[in-house]
Image: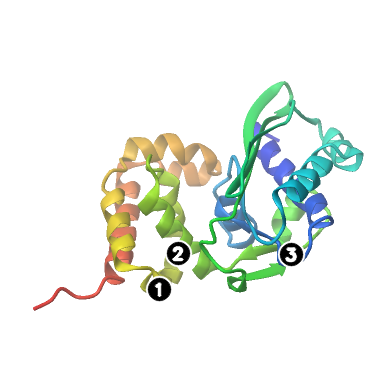
Amino acid sequence: MNPREAVERFHLVFLRHFAAVISPGTICLKGGVNLRLYHNSPRLSEDIDFDARVVGVDVLKKNVNKVLASRPLLTELAAVGITLSEIKPAKQTQTAQRWEFHVIHEANPVPTRLEFSRRKDEPFENSVTELPAAALLAAQQVVPFVFNHYTAPAAYRQKINALATRTQVQARDVFDLDHLSQYAVAARDVPSDLVTKAIDQLALISFVMFKDQVVPFLPADLAEHYGTQEAWERMSEKVWNDLSAALPPPAP
């Protein structure tokens, strides 16, 4: 297990224990971990992102802290040589709650973050509660569990929003949009000005950024495949074409 795989093991173990303490309809998994666990993405993630609804700030803070400090979770992690650094709630507001700490495996500390947003980008009806990928659970030797997560079309729309609105562009958004390309028709439900902004932001992302930000989080064979200028150009062109197809035709 390398350090990034250790972070993924923590993500899975946390989700399994967290699922037991949350009420239906209050939490939905999104972002890279959603794509990894439920939509066959090969990209590992540093952080876990959620949307939160209904549940109060204090109740959510109590539940997350309880799970992170629980003996069953810590024992399960310790069995595979994983410990956690001191955990501090970094941000606790009505719109966002965040925990930041390090996952430590074989003396290698890797930062991770849990973040819960109440910005209501996607209604929960675009979600489903089910098992993560069986092969991934088996590879990480984690007992099966179910969790609420966004569907692929919803994830595609969220990725457009992320690409369009970040103050610092991230190459992972391009990789994820390419991975979800078969759901590109979902872009037609995104406001045209947001799609246009995403296309503009796409032009700001370079191969160097992609190689630094994404390639290290891929399996060795895919890292070799994607770690070339040509592969990046094909990917970014595909995403550009997918997004452009969602825009209305220019006026005559």
Q: CA distance from mark 3 to mark 1?
A: 28 Å
Which residue is painted at 31% across and 42% down in the image? 229
Quarter of the image with the C terminus in it: bottom left
Instruction: Determine whether label 3 and label 1 are within 8 Å by CB.
Output: no
Above or below, comparing residue 131 to residue 233 in the picture: below
Q: CA distance from mark 2 to mark 3?
A: 22 Å
Q: Which residue is mark 2?
A: 157
Disc 1 residue type (three-letter): Asp
Front disc: 3 or 1: 1
Q: Which residue is mark 1?
A: 189
Of the pair 65 and 252, the residue shown nearer to us = 65
Q: Secondary structure at mark 3?
A: loop
Disc 3 residue type (three-letter): Leu
Residue 108 is situated, as x and y percent measured from the top left of the image, at 68, 23
Instruction: Determine whether label 2 and label 3 are within 8 Å by CB.
Output: no
Quarter of the image with the N terminus in it: top right
Q: Residues within 10 Å of mark 3 (few under 14, many from 20)?
A: some
Instruction: Determine whether label 1 and label 2 are within 8 Å by CB.
Output: yes
Q: Secondary structure at mark 2?
A: helix
The answer to whether 213 appears left or right of 117 in the picture is: left
Of the pair 211 and 55, the residue shown nearer to us = 55
Q: Residue furthest left?
A: 252
